[in-house]
Image (cartoon, rainbow, N blue to C red):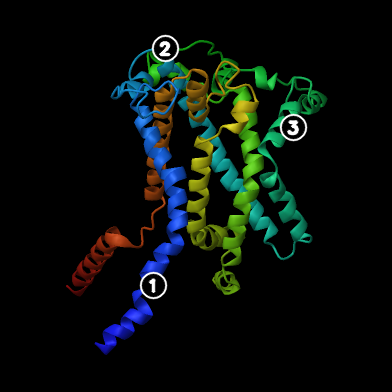
Amino acid sequence: MGKTSVGKGIRGSEGRYGWTFIAPAILIIGVFLVVPIFLALYVSFSNWNGLGSPIGNSSLVGGDNYAKVLVDSGLAQRDFGTSIRNNFYYVLLVVPLQTALALFLAVQVNRRVLRGRGFFRTAFYFPSVTSSVAITTIFIFLFTASGAVNTLLGWLGINGPNWFADPSGIIHNLLKGVGVTSAPPLFNEGGPLGLTWWDWVSGPSVAMCVLIILAVFTTSGTFMLLFLAALQNIGAEIDEAAEMDGAGPMRKFFSVTLPMLKPTLFTVLTLGLIGTWQVFDQIYLTGKGAPGKTLLTPAFLAYDTSFKGLNWGEGAAISFILFLIIVALTLLQRYILRDRDTGRGAIRRAQKADRELHEEAARAAR
C-alpha cells in the first residue's frame, strides 16, 4: 500500500498533466489541419459549388470528380494531363540540379582554406530567405524580350527567345534542329490523360526553363546549409584515415564523404520532391499557366478549378491525386535510397556470402 501511494504521488499525475499541456496544440492541429483535410476529402466526392458549408449544401457524386480528370475524355482530363507533364519535367530537372548545386556549394564553403567563408555562406543562402514574389518579379524583368539576359546573349551573337511567351518544348526544338518537324505516326497516337505521346515528349517549354532556373537559384542555399551541417559532423580523423589509405580527393568524396551524407541526401531529395510538385507562387505570377498552358501545374490547376471555375469537388480531387503522387514518389525514393546493410535483405546476403565462403573452403580442402 505504501509503494502504491508513493507511486501515485510521484508518477500518477504525470499522464494527466502531460495531456493537459499538449491539449491546446492537439486542439489547434485538429481544428485547423485534421478537420479541413477530411472536409476536403468529402468535398472531392461531392458536387459542392462553394456556397455555404459543404455539409448540408452538397450531395455525394461518388468518384465522378476523379473520373473527370483521370478517365473521361474532355478538357478537364487534358488540362490535368498537361499539368502533370509540365510538373514532371520541372521535377525531373529541378530536384537533381538543386541537390547537386547545394552539395557543391556546401563542399566549397566547408573548405578550411577558403577565406570569407561566412560571407559566401550568407550570399548563397540569401536568395532562399528573399520573398518568392520579389525574386519572381525580378526574373520576369530579366527574361523579357528586351531584358538583361537577351541583351547579354545579343553581345555573344545569340538571338534570345521571348522567354515567357514561348510555349515550344525544348526537346521538340532540338528535334527540329535535326529535321524532325512533326510527330512520327507512332507518337501521334493517343497517350495517357488525353495527351498524345508527342505531347508527352515535348520537354519543358522555354518559359518553364526560366522557372527551373529560378527554383534552382532560390532553393540551393537552404539545402546547402543542410549539407554543410552534415559535412561538419564528419570527423577529421575519417578524412585522415582515407588519405593514409591513399584515397585521392575524388575517391575520398565518393567513397567516404558521400555515403556518410546519405541521411541528409534523403532529406534534401524528399524536401525537393515535395516542394517541386507543389509549385504555385511562380505560376500565379508569371501568367497563370500561359503561354499555351505550358506553365500549368497540378497545384495551380486545383486552385484555378476551385476558385475560378467554382468546381470545388474537381479541384479537391486534383489536390488529393497530387497528394498521392507525392506520397508514392517519396516511398519509391525511400526504397531506392534504403540502407542495404541492414534489415532482412542484408541478413540474407550475409548468409549467402557465408555459405559461399564455406563451400569455397570445402573445395579448397579437397
Task: Give percent across and percent down for residue 40.
Answer: 40, 33
Q: Earlier in the sequence, mark 1 or mark 2?
A: 1
Is residue 198 depicted above or below 117 in this figure?
A: above
| Cβ atoms at labels 1 and 2 below 8 Å apart | no
Q: Is residue 196 visible?
A: no
Q: Mark 3 sits on what residue?
A: 138
Identify the residue position indicated by label 2 in the image: 188
Residue at screen point 37% across, 40% down: 328
Secondary structure found at label 1 = helix
Gap in angstroms between the C-alphas marked 1 and 3 = 55 Å
Q: Earlier in the sequence, mark 3 or mark 2?
A: 3
Does residue 343 lie above or below 241 as drawn?
A: above
Return the residue nearer the eye: 242 or 139: 139
Q: Amino acid at mark 3?
A: Ile
Near-viewer residue (284 or 60): 60
Mark 3 and mark 2: Cα distance apart in space: 39 Å
Q: Amino acid at mark 1?
A: Glu
Location of mark 1 (residue): 14
Q: Can the viewer see residue 244 in this picture?
A: yes
Q: Residue at x 39, y 28 (%)?
A: 54
